[in-house]
Amino acid sequence: MRISTNMQDDIKKVLLTEEQIKKRVKEMGEQLSKEYMDKRVILICILKGAAPFFTDLVREMDCQLEFEFMSISSYGNSTKTSGIVRIAKDVDISLTDRHVLIVEDIMDSGLTLKHLTQLLSSRNPASMKIACLLDKKERRECDITPDYCGFEIENEFVVGYGLDFAGYYRNLKYIGVLKESVYSE
Ligand code: IMP
Ligand code: MG
């Protein structure tokens, strides 16, 4: 693993610019505002990756909503999720009879969100949907699709705008493909 001092040096190419992300997040916010007008939705930010997307998205929504934060960790190794999630930090309020929107950075195999939605549906929300910024559709290993998706992307390892490698690059303003030299031996 070779992480450079300057983050930009580790990026092979920019996949989505700051402007592209901003425009799409605004569109999603407008769509979600219409969808959730009068529903007093609870938005659950899945830490840590979804934090930048979440904070931008909520400011593009003009309906009444509540913020909640959840932190989950999935069992497995660094490259492969088992899909079995452990809740490291739970929401602070009851979800029973409430409209819930899970906000996540990226859907890959889908196993993490599959397990999480199963877990949360046992709390009997009035509705539960998923908003994902990115979707790596071809990697899916179970039957789950985001209800709202920012961008469908190819099967490449991306970082930035919340997405990390080994905890770094989350603070990039754009989303980029990481150079293989960073994670190869
Ligand atoms: P899955 O859908 O259960 O396979 O796992 C999704 C999680 O894997 C995301 O929440 C990310 O933490 C991580 N992940 C998947 N693909 C990428 C990527 O390209 N860059 C950074 N993290 C990723
Ligand atoms: Mg994540």
Image (spheres, rainbow, N blue to C red):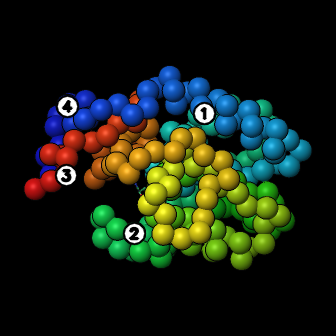
Residue designated by label 2: 81
Q: Earlier in the sequence, mark 3 or mark 2?
A: 2
Classed neighbour count for the residue bearing mark 4: other residues with Cα under 10 Å, few (<14), some (14–19), many (≥20): few
| The label number, if any, that marks residue 183 in the structure image | 3
| The label number, if any, that marks residue 25 in the structure image | 1
Q: Secondary structure at mark 3?
A: helix
Q: Secondary structure at mark 1?
A: helix
- Mark 4 → mark 1, Cα distance in angstroms: 27 Å
Q: Is mark 2 within 8 Å of ligand 1?
A: yes
Which residue lies at the image location 74% right of the left edge and 41% below the top edge? 32
Which residue lies at the image location 67% right of the left edge and 37% below the top edge? 28
Q: Position of residue 97 (x, y in %)?
A: 84, 65
Q: Find residue 5 and report its image quarter.
A: top left
Q: Is residue 128 left or right of residue 142?
A: right
Q: Secondary structure at mark 4?
A: helix
Identify the image quadrant of the C terminus. Answer: bottom left
- Mark 4 → mark 2, Cα distance in angstroms: 28 Å
Q: Amino acid at mark 2?
A: Thr
Q: Amino acid at mark 4?
A: Asp
Relative to 31, residue 87 above or below: below
- Mark 4 → mark 3, Cα distance in angstroms: 14 Å
> Contact, CB < 8 Å: mark 3 with mark 2?
no
Q: Secondary structure at mark 2?
A: strand
Residue designated by label 4: 9
- Mark 3 → mark 2, Cα distance in angstroms: 17 Å
